[in-house]
Image: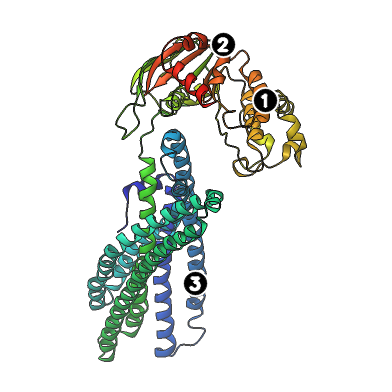
Amino acid sequence: MNLDRRLLALLRGPRGAFIVTVALGVLGGLLIVAQAALAAAMVDAVFLQGGDLATIRGAAVAFVAVLLARALAAWGAEVSAFRVAAAVKRTLRARLLTHLEALGPLYTHGERTGELTNTLTEGLEELETYFRHYLPQVVLAAAVPLLVLVLVFPRDWISGLILLFTAPLIPLFMNLIGSIAESLTKKQWQQLERMSAFLLDALQGLTALKILGRSREYIRRVEEVSDRFRATTLEVLRIAFISALVLEWVGTLSTAVVSVGIGLRLLYGRLAFEQAFFVLLLTPEFYFPLRQLGARFHAGMGGVAAAERIFAVLEQPPQVPAGTGRGRAVAHPFPLRLERVTFTYPDASAPALQDVSLTLEEGTQVALVGPSGAGKSTLAGLLLRFIVPQRGEIWAGEHRLAEIPPAVWRQSVAWVPQQPYLFNTTVEANIRLARPDASREEVVRAAKIARADAFIRALPEGYETVVGEQGARLSGGQAQRIALARALLKNAPFLILDEPTASLDPEHEAAIQEGLQALLARRTALIIAHRLQTVTHADKVAVLENGRLVQVGAPDALAAQEGLFRRLLQAREAAA
């Protein structure tokens, strides 16, 4: 049986609806018995006892009432089962999204976006069939045949024995075939995830593929990936069809054995007609829940395969404890102090940061420089609380940063990345992300300070213009100014700036610099400097090399002394 304890634990929430689903299913089984008893009594009364319509009027009315009650019970079971599945999906989706947020960029950057998206969509949809059809059927496959046996044995113990000994054949064959299909189902799910990730990569990199002349090659690779998924899916379907054939054959043959036995004993007068007809009507209903379980067994395997991936994500321990996220921003977060901080990425052979000590005083601007891979982004990630140090301590004023819930701490931090992410919504909504309760006037004021208001008003619908996925309808400079407006609207006391002018042309750079000066005014800032001319405006420069802090001081002082900073300046001048 495809019963996973982690999945069963999800029924605690909609437990009432699940009980109703099963109860209505069992009620349907009782009504089937009542229907068979009424049908047997009416046929016996009319054809063998010579009765007329008046004789069976009461039984006929009861028969119609039972039919209506069965329909209502089936409808109610379907509705409550849908509610069970919907509640489980809603709960699991919320848990997944919350856990992905807690895992942070360190985890999501290491995963393929297509696979995660497939898990959040197709994976959860697979679970609907599992909870809506398969699990209730597991209970009904045990309860309804048992109910039939209890009623058949007193009337015909021989048929009861046949039913008792043939019933286990269906679960037996179902598990034998299911063990073969299980590995194929998991393989099918893994290939679906890989295909989703591959297609998303291809779509996102379509421009590069066209420029490099590799789009035709990728089309062939898409065909290969799709063919592998198609072949595995057909294998799963082939096993499912074979399984259905075997289960139907077992059920039909068992019903035939019972029917032949009843017919012979009826012929020789060893069994009353009403009893024989009653048992004969119930026999197919005895096997029906078991055959239904076999038909839904493969849906159950699909749900378990999807759940493996879902729980693999949920069981990943977050780098940073989520905390409650309640409370106001820290009133006095300065000075910010890193004391002998060390951090090593999972599976990395060397620390990304090692024994780094650095102080950011209130109102000062510290430029962080160093070669690629020196640890600049890691240090920013620590201060954003996406990751936590394995050794050392970070202080925000008198508070340990580890003791402040990440959501509370981030109220004190504004982050302007080199390539800001814009959502496929309006300009105003993208700016307002920093402070959803801000008024339209505050949004416009922030855009004006960031030197973005003029170009926004020139857009087709002004602030209501949809910017496209990842800001595709805007230039790089326009996207950067919207990011600056977003940071200005947040008005946080601490700013982490991944130099946003590093990849812009001089015209756009001048506009961004004006907005930057307004953003940096009277704020404490850590500026990740990619171009060394940026550091001339900083109060202090921190130089990283191979994860270690090798120099700290004023720009002019570091430029005058031997060291990495001076060599970087000389390399820039030689390149110019």
Above or below for 144 versus 59: above
Residue at image location 36% in from the left, 63% down from the top: 298
Nearer the observer: mark 1 or 2; the answer is 1
Instruction: Identify residue type, mark 1.
Output: Ala
Q: Quadrant of residue 492?
A: top right
Quote the CA–CA distance across marks 3 and 2.
Answer: 79 Å
Give residue 438's position: percent from left, percent from top. 68, 27
Which of the two residues, 176 or 163, is positioned nearer the viewer here?
Answer: 176
Nearer the observer: mark 3 or 2; the answer is 2
In-image side of 133 versus 171 (left or right)? right
Q: Which mark is residue 510?
A: 1
Instruction: Identify residue type, mark 3.
Output: Leu
Between disc 3 and disc 2, whose residue precedes? 3
Report the residue marked by disc 2.
Answer: 363
Asked whether the viewer can see residue 124, the reply is no
Residue at image location 62% in from the left, 20% down from the top: 491
Above or below for 481 versus 335: below
